[in-house]
Each structure stands twice: as C-alpha cells, then as structure tokens.
Amino acid sequence: MGGRGEGGECAAALPGQDGMLAEMAQAIRRNELIMHYQPKIRLDTREVVGFEALVRWQHGRKGLIGPYHFVPAVESSPLLAAFTDKTIELALGQCALWQARGHFLKIAINISARMLEDDEFVPRLLRQLAFYEVPAARISLELTETALLVNLAKGQAMVHQLRDHGVSLSIDDFGAGYTSFTYLREFMVPEIKLDCAFVTDLEVNRFNASLVRSLAMFCEALGADFVAEGVERRDDWPTLLGLGCRIAQGYSIARPMAGEDVLPWLREWAKPALALPA
C-alpha cells in the first residue's frame, strides 16, 4: 500500500508513532492525503494500459511526505480502514474526473493485507464505485504476494468475492516473498507484478533473466498480464521484451504525477518522437 518515494518529497523526521497517527487522523479529516499516478505501458506498442495510484501526505508544515514514512505505522493501527477508504475515494474521484473528460483509464489501488480480514471492505468498495459511477472493471486492487499468504483462506474468499463483482486483483512485488507457482495458479489473478529488485542487470544476471523468462511463460499459460516494476532504463525495454515481459512501469516511462498532470502527459506520450526509446 503506497508506493516508492519520489525525489523532492520530505524526509524530515515525523513525530513518534502515536503522535504521527494522531496527525494522520487529522490529515484524513483535513483532506491532506493526495494521490499520484504512475503509468504502465506495453513495451512493444507503447500503449498506456493503466495507472497505479500512489498515496502521499501533503503535510501542512513538512511538505510532501512519501508513503514509506507513514504507511507501515498506519497499516498496524486502527486507522487502516479509514485510511484505505480515503485513498480509494481519492482514486475513484480522479477516475470519475477523467471519465467526464472522455478518458476511461484503469487505475490500480494498493491495499493492505489486513483489509482481507475486514468483512465490510468489499461492501464499502462497491458503494464507493456506485457513488462515483466508476465501473468495477476500471479498477484493480494490488496486494503483495505475502499478503495473500498471511491468511490463505481469507485471501481466496476475497479474490472470489471481488471477481464476482467485476473487480480484479493484482499481486504486487512478486519475488520478494515466498509464493509458489501453485498458489498463483489457485488464485488466478489477472496480473502479476515482478518486484523491481529482479529487473536490474538482466543482461548479466542469469538468475534475474531466468526468473523473468519463467514467470512470463507462466503468466502466458494462466492468461495473466505480467508487469515489470521499477524499469528505470529504456535500454532494458528490448531485453524485457526478449524475455517475454511486455508490460512495464518505472521511471524510464514516467515518474508518479499529480492527477491533473496525467492527461497532458498522455498527450505528450502519444507523440511518436517521445514514445520511442532513446
């Protein structure tokens, strides 16, 4: 839940956990949480297939604070449900604004493993979708692979419940945990995102390259999209394509951006000279 930090975000020390959570409760009420959006593209066609919504805290005194400074504490606190509902509200509100301008973009939203234990989470999500008039098929929820294994039965039940309502689930940061291919097959999620640690040094790191190739073949057999995260160099695009990975996200495409910057970015990206790798 959250996303990688951005250059220029505040890294100043926040108060102790109790103080920070008290400030976060106020931040939720004061609408200090904002979302940035990072695109995912098909490497072979340069088609934009969606955006990941990444939360930031626009702190009144400390400026823009990245998620790694507050999300871990929120995840283990009673604020989690309110925090999650707020991030979903922000993402769906932005999606509705894009819809009104004729852009029907798919958004991925990160959620915590603990939300699998909340029986009211799916009903609340469905009410939010109805309120913003965003089709369920236009969003996906991202969970880390370890999140699904924390409570396998609950994870499977929620995956099926979400699927029944048209909401898809994505496994994020694959490779950082211990999920077996057997579990992936059982969950039948439509998207698997490879942890950015395995996208580096593909031309010389045989293990990373073999993992990418094997997972690409596995996803193809499942009919699932396979996404490489943290693709920071355009030089890696042909290598990923050669290994069977056709979708990527990372700084070589774009950094996370404010919602109002997405449509101008899309117009620029559509220009052929800018869409081609250097």
Image (cartoon, rainbow, N blue to C red):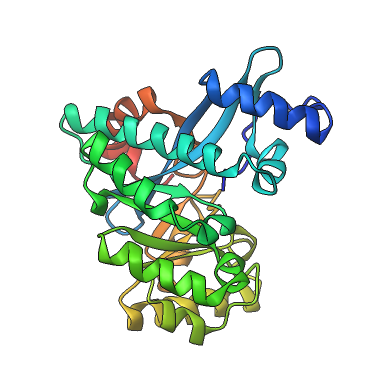
Residue at the (58%, 77%) spot, across then down: 179
Vertical comparison of 260 with 176: above or below: above
Taking depth in this image into account, of 67 and 126 the one nearest to the observer is 126
Left or right: where does residue 24 sit relative to residue 88? Answer: right
Left or right: where does residue 132 sit relative to residue 215? Answer: left
Q: Is residue 271 visible?
A: no
Q: Which residue lies furthest to the bottom in this view?
A: 182
Image position, residue 17 (x, y; %): 80, 35
Q: Residue furthest left?
A: 102
Image quarter for residue 59? top right
Vertical comparison of 130 with 58: above or below: below
Residue at the (33%, 30%) spot, across then down: 94
Image quarter hosting the C terminus: top left
Residue at the (45%, 74%) spot, across then down: 156
Vertical comparison of 240 with 37: above or below: below
Taking depth in this image into account, of 55 and 253 the one nearest to the observer is 55
Taking depth in this image into account, of 241 and 165 the one nearest to the observer is 165
Image position, residue 191 (x, y; %): 39, 65
Image position, residue 225 (x, y; %): 36, 67
Taking depth in this image into account, of 30 and 44 the one nearest to the observer is 30
Residue at the (51%, 56%) spot, across then down: 118
Image position, residue 143 (x, y; %): 51, 59
Q: Can residue 95 be seen in this view?
A: yes
Image quarter for residue 275? top left
